[in-house]
Every structure is written in structure tokens, then in C-alpha cells.
Image (cartoon, coloured by chain):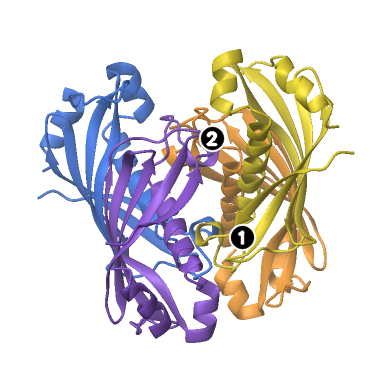
Chain colours: A purple, B blue, C orange, D yellow
Amino acid sequence: MTKPHILPIRVYYEDTDAAGIVYHANYLRFAERGRTEMLRDAGFEHAQILHETGVAFTVRSMNINFKIPAKLDELLSVQTRMVSVGGASMEMAQAICRGDDVLADMTVKIACIDKRGKAARLPEAVRGLFRHKT
Amino acid sequence: MTKPHILPIRVYYEDTDAAGIVYHANYLRFAERGRTEMLRDAGFEHAQILHETGVAFTVRSMNINFKIPAKLDELLSVQTRMVSVGGASMEMAQAICRGDDVLADMTVKIACIDKRGKAARLPEAVRGLFRHKT
Amino acid sequence: MTKPHILPIRVYYEDTDAAGIVYHANYLRFAERGRTEMLRDAGFEHAQILHETGVAFTVRSMNINFKIPAKLDELLSVQTRMVSVGGASMEMAQAICRGDDVLADMTVKIACIDKRGKAARLPEAVRGLFRHKT
Amino acid sequence: MTKPHILPIRVYYEDTDAAGIVYHANYLRFAERGRTEMLRDAGFEHAQILHETGVAFTVRSMNINFKIPAKLDELLSVQTRMVSVGGASMEMAQAICRGDDVLADMTVKIACIDKRGKAARLPEAVRGLFRHKT
């Protein structure tokens, strides 16, 4: 299996809540940044993919486990791995880590859609790129 | 089975993203408001529970399906149902709806923890209240 | 002078930060909901205005004072008053209150723009409606 | 005058709204990251300052101009400069830029408070550090 994509993330006040920890929904924002940066490192950006191929990615479902809370000022890393690639979808496994600790992990099903919101074929360039990574 | 708790939610600019729809992580914020209001209607508030019993609720895991996108200005409803109640945890089923359409649905496992973050017994008053609702 | 538009707002975990209070930028989200609801009560919605007249509103500048912090579970109110209406802009005064206390206040300059982002004339229906309110 | 502190910021879907641009309140989140990183580069972190000196920083007021909208995938920079330092407060000037363009600029008054929320003296170490920067 290949190495995961890694994106460092600093926890700011905006990410925390009155319980003194990162608000649970914000782990999904961190994860989305990880997926976006994995694409960008592969040479693709959301607006550019939409412009060139008319398709966009949308999250269809997620299973998330929140294990250990993150706190203000901590430096985390979002680890992203492609699990499988289909004709019009992808599945990724992600973890938000602090050093060796897994704070939260999730599996994410992503669908490729066109401008009308209908299922569309994953662009070959993106598909071919990730085929080698599984 | 009992009727679900219902909370109306208006979609504002803050909830949307450049794809013209509600950003996926924001459904979790809507769902948390639904769970909080279900508690409040039952006579309990987070800060009060913490003050009186020393415990708080934390999300342990979630399975979410994003089915139909919500848009700016729409009026949605968060429907919340208790599925099961344990000694130190609860499971809820929630849906974000627009009229008869289910836009997103999720199951949420909630743990009861003390101020050190360790598992704590669900306060009897909260527990007894919800026992009748399953 | 007329009475301000009033919108009740409940503080949820999503609005707070690790300092135990509402994160400062979130008062701007509350204020935007107040402006949107003032428009909606007058019969107008953002998407509808854009569709019918091709114009949208954008915030040009704000002066904000943060006076007293709001906390989890509190019930606040956003009070919104139109101060002046021009050909292509409006100025509003808003306050986020808790009972009689003013927690934050602000003046907001709003510009009316077309789909290219250029200055556009405030739709007459909206303009006429607010003329009477100053 | 000294050079400003510079923090690069990438625009993600989470930062945008249905108008296709960065939602106005999010510029305040970017600015807060800039102030926090300026402090961190000077050797101080929020949680550490609170622990060692019992004080925290809170935003008292802001004047903001929104000039040019930022879009998805853009790389921005937050530029932060200390304008003046008092016994219990600081004033900063910040700008969110894209290349040579100033997208938004603001002046921010920050107060130093103790755990009860009362005015407290700016810690000498922080104060002395910034005195040289004005």
C-alpha cells in the first residue's frame, strides 16, 4: 500500500468550542482540506476540474469515529489514502492525527457529478492518477 | 415508536459554499442543534447538566448519508429520534428534511463523560426521560 | 425613528470557542441572519431578488464593538435598523443583545451589485420599502 | 516601520458561500490566524500565555473594509502589523491580500484580560517584544 497524503493543520480558536476542544463538525473541514490538497499535489484544483471537464466532487456518505479530542494550539496532521476508485466515485480513508495518536478517523464516499448534479464519469486524468495509489 | 423531535432551520449564506449548496459539514451543526433542542424541550441545558451532575455529552461516532443538497433561503427541519439509551451512552437517529424529502440522514453515538473526559453514567433524570421515548 | 427588526438567536456549541464564549467572528453571522430576516419579513429573499432583478447585496465595510461576551445556551436577539438608503447602497445599525444588555454593536455599509460585481441600483421595491423605515 | 508578519492562507470550500466568494465573516477568522501566528513566531502561544501569566487577549473592536472578493482555490496572505501597544491593550492593522491586491483591510483593537474578564496588564515579555516592532 502506498503512503498516505499528509497535510499539517494548526488548531486555532475558530476550530474550538466551549468544551475546550475542537468542535466535532470541524474534523470534516480538516478532512476536506486534506482531500483537496491531495488533489492539488496531483496537479488538480476544484475550479479547474469543473472548468475543464464540467464535473465536481460531492461527499455521498461518511463513517466517522471521534476518539481523542484535539485542543487549541495543537499541530495535527490529516492523513488521506485512496481506498478504491470507480467509474463515477471514489472511496477514501482519512485520519486526523497528533503525532502517533489517531484523534479521529473516517471513511468517505465521494461521487463525481455534473453541473446538473447528476452522476458523471470520473475524469480519466484524475482516475488514472489514483489507480496507481491503491 | 414515538414521534421525532422537530426543529426548523433556515439556510443562510453562512451555511452555503461556492457549489451553491449547504457545505456538507454544516449538516452536523444542524443536527447538533436538533439534539440540543430535544434536550432543552425535556428541561435540560448543556451548561446546567454540567453544573448539576458534572457530566457532558460528546459525539463518539456518526454514519451520515448526504442525499439531496439544500440551498440558500430554504426552510429545513431537523428530525431527531432516540434509538437506544445505555448506562453511559445514547444512540440517536436524525434526518435533515425539506418538506417530505430527506436531504441527509445519520445515526449518532453519544457518550456521557465527566470533566476529565472519562466515561460517566448518564444522569438518571435524562435517562429516565428518554427511556419512554424509545 | 421606527422600531428595529428583532431576531432571536440561541447560542449553540458551534458558536462558542475554547475561551468559553461566542467566537468574535460569529457575531457577524448572527448579524447577517438579522439583515436577511428583516428583508424576508418585508417580502424579499436573496435568491429571489437575484432572480427577479439580477442584483445582490454585499457588505462593503463594518465597524464593530465587542462589549460583553455571550455564552453557551444563552438566548440573544439581533436588532437591526436601517440608517440610510442610497441609490446603490444602504447603511444599517445592528446590535446583538441579551435582555437589556448590548453585547456587541455595529454599523454595516451594504452595496448593491450586479452579477459581474459592479455597482447596481437598489431595486425600487426594496428601496421604497425601507425609505419609510428611516 | 517594520515589515508586517505574513501568513499564507488557502481558500477552501468551507470558506466560501453561495455567492461564489469567501463569506465576509471568514476574513475575521483569517485575520485571527495571522495575529496568532505573529505571536507564535515571537515565541508565545495562547494557552501558554494563559497558563504562565493568567491573561488572554480579546478583540474589543474592529473596522473592516471588504474591497475585492476572494474565490475558491486562491492563495491569499494575511499581513499583520502592530500599530500601538498600551498597558492593557494593543492595536493592529491587518490586510488580506492576493498578490499585490488588498482584498480586505482592518484595524483591530485587542484588550488583555484576566480569567474573570477584567482588564489586565499586557505581560512584559509580550509587550517588550512588540515595542520594537512599531
Q: Nearer the viewer, mark 2 or mark 1?
A: 1
Residue D22 badge: 1
The reply, left or right, for residue C23 in relation to residue B59 is right
Give percent across and percent down for residue B27: 37, 55
Give percent across and percent down for residue B56: 30, 28
Residue in the picture at 78% in, 20% down: D128
Label 2 marks a residue whose chain is: C
Residue in the picture at 75% in, 62% down: D99
The reply, left or right, for residue D114 in relation to residue B23 is right
Pointers 2 and 1 in contact (CB under 8 A)? no
Q: Which residue is mark 2?
A: C22
Front position in the image: B126 or A52: A52
Give percent across and percent down for residue D39: 67, 32
Amino acid at pointer 2: Val
Give percent across and percent down for residue A89: 30, 75
Q: Secondary structure at mark 1?
A: loop
Label 1 marks a residue whose chain is: D
